[in-house]
Amino acid sequence: MNRNLWLVLGTAVFFGLATGVYEYIFPLFLQARKVSFEQMGMIFAVSGTVMVLVRIYMGGLSDRFGRKPMFATALAVCGLAIAAPPLLPGLLLQLVTKIFREIAALTRETIFPIVLYEEQRGAFLNFIGKFRGVEFMVQAGGTLLAGLIIARLGASAGYPISLYLAGGGLVLVACWFAMLFKEHRSAPTQQAVSLRDLFNLDLHHNLKVILVAGIIFTFGVMLSHSFFLPLFFLKRFPGEVASHWNPALMSLHRVTIALPMLLVGNLRLKNLRAWYIWGFIIEGITMAACAVIPNYWASAGVFLLHDLIGAGIWSPIQATVIQRFSRDETRGIEVGKVLAWTSVGGIAGPLVAGFLANMSPVYPFLYSGLIMIAAVVPLFWLRLETPGRVGVTAEA
């Protein structure tokens, strides 16, 4: 690998560590401040609404000004937003920091695969799988680290210290990336991103299909994978067992998506559409099943399968298809547009999850799985060429 790829991998490691800490701690931190499920859902939903258009706009800016400044800025803002919550009183300020964190994190998520694709087009599936696999593996370590800090220092000290360390480290990594990354691609002379550019769907047919399926699937995912994810097993199985094992379970959750991603580039996947569809179906079935299983260990075991044989396979496939069918000159805005409009489904998800969780802790996970399964329907309209080994062959 060249220096740029090592730098991108390094940012993935530190971003994964910070994300693992933040996504585990933040809902628990809000709960400790007596924030209700409905209020948590509102915080996550409003932040999701704001970031949709911003995410497209940021992708367009990376086409205009280059990947490096946008990527480094996104990392720095994300780090500051992760470290800020313990310093701020009131629900409104927590909402503001959440908005900035989501905008920054999703801007980074938009540019991350673009940088990889522009550095390694011929082996993109292999690289995106391995880099994201490492990122998720480190997220597991971040979640476990947060759990150990809390166990050692208690919640009152453990929550803020975990967030300070995660956010501060990410800011330092942003500076490191800005100093060392070399942008090979000169920024094209494009006009500023217009309002029309944000809303039009001038995309390849396959990108439109992914967009529609993604809206449905993301709504389903966010019913279970927003604020309620680290709280589900605590509420579904109250007692010392679930409480004791919750940090380890959330860490294993990250490991199970990392393992297949690390291997997917070495597999000979000839029918991408079939793998994509079955990934959605398997993930939905396992999420719905773990919600209704009455035994903690059985439920946790089934829960850990949803990424191992679901998202760990279909996620790098989706990233590959998006890059292949995006145009070089407008890659940033097209990738941003697909990912941003896909995330529209996640706006209502946390709000609905808050109301469902108040009725029963089973409902957010149960309906999450059922909606994931329904999201496969648009994928039957994908038109993909899959000769040979994906990620090694020529562009589709």
Image (spheres, helix red, strand yellow):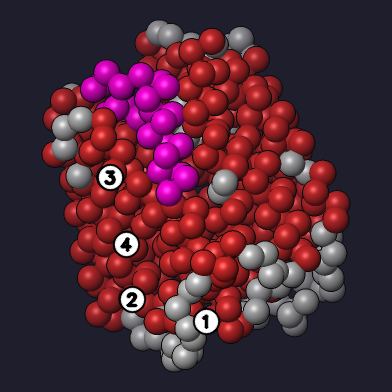
Percent across and percent down for residue 216 are: 68, 41
Q: Which residues are magenta?
A: 27-50
Q: Which of marks 4 and 3 precedes in the sequence?
A: 4
Kind of residue sitting beneath label 4: Leu
Label located before the other in sequence (1 or 4): 4
Tag 3: residue type? Thr
Image position, residue 348 (x, y; %): 54, 34
- Residue 341 lies, in percent from the top left, at 59, 54
Residue at x-position 20% and y-position 30%: 90
Q: Amino acid at mark 1?
A: Glu
Identify the image quadrant of the C terminus.
bottom right
Q: Do we see residue 80 in this rendering?
A: yes
Identify residue type, mark 2.
Pro
Q: Which mark is residue 75?
A: 4
Disc 3 is placed on an element classified as helix
Judge the density around disc 1: few (<14), some (14-19), many (≥20) Cα neighbours within 10 Å: some
Residue where numbered disc 2 is placed: 69
| Measured Cα–Cα span from mark 3 to mark 2 | 21 Å
For residue 73, side relative to residue 59 (left or right): left
Circle 1 is placed at which residue position? Answer: 119
Marks 3 and 2: which is nearer the front? 3
- For residue 97, the mark is 3
